[in-house]
Amino acid sequence: MAMRESTARIRNSGLQNLMEIYTLERWKTDTLLQKHMKSTAEAFLKDPRNKWLFIGGQTGAGKSHICTAIAGELLRRGQSVRYMLWKDESTKLKAVITDESKYERMINPLKTVPVLYIDDLFKPVLDDRGARKQPSPGDTSLAFEIINSRYIAGNLTTIISSEWTIEELQRVEPATAGRIFQMATESYCLSIASGDEKNYRLRRKKA
């Protein structure tokens, strides 16, 4: 029974194909940043008082790897985890927003699941000049609804990765950013400044 329940949790989480690849054991610690990201993840997993973690900033720095590793470990510990790839799930939710019953059926699990991992919050879209566009009102409203609901509950674990740093999110959507920072605290809120030297995907391509 325990094995069946564990298998179902992994299948329902949406992380089945990722959690074997993105583990803390596979995470490299060649740089100070990589060491800091791993030590933050390990501290978060050991600290029962902290429920929220946010990693934002430079693309290719391993944000999704670390967040997936944390979510995968929580799954292995028997917690119910839900993976939300922001771009895909937000599009589906916005498409049914006028159908109240369908919308509630889709969004309620995101508000109530014990562990929610939001991957790539407000995935940036570039304009004709290559600059990042601001998230749409529909996206900011949806994010606030989910995050505020979990913020009010107080006891739900929330893991978030984004290409926006928490400082940038503060300018984009201060109400949402403020709740994330308050819940994650400075200890578990990482902002990775831009820099190609931190894009490990690019580094692997050059090797």
Image (tube, rainbow, N blue to C red):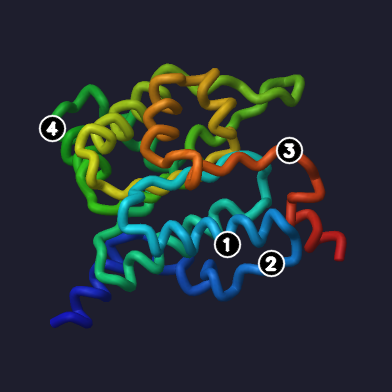
User: Which of disc 3 and disc 2 is earlier in sequence?
Assistant: 2
Quadrant, the N terminus: bottom left
Q: Amino acid at mark 4?
A: Ser
Which residue was labeled with disc 3? 194
Which residue was labeled with disc 1? 38
Q: Quadrant of residue 74?
A: bottom left
**Marks 1 and 3, Cα distance to the nearest angstrom?**
19 Å
User: Which of disc 4 and disc 3 is earlier in sequence?
Assistant: 4
Q: Quadrant of residue 112?
A: top left
Q: Amino acid at mark 2?
A: Thr
Residue at 52% across / 26% down in the picture? Answer: 169
**Marks 4 and 1, Cα distance to the nearest angstrom?**
41 Å
Q: Amino acid at mark 1?
A: Lys
User: Which of disc 3 and disc 1 is earlier in sequence?
Assistant: 1
Which residue was labeled with disc 4? 101
Q: Secondary structure at mark 3?
A: loop
Determine whether label 2 and label 1 are within 8 Å by CB: yes
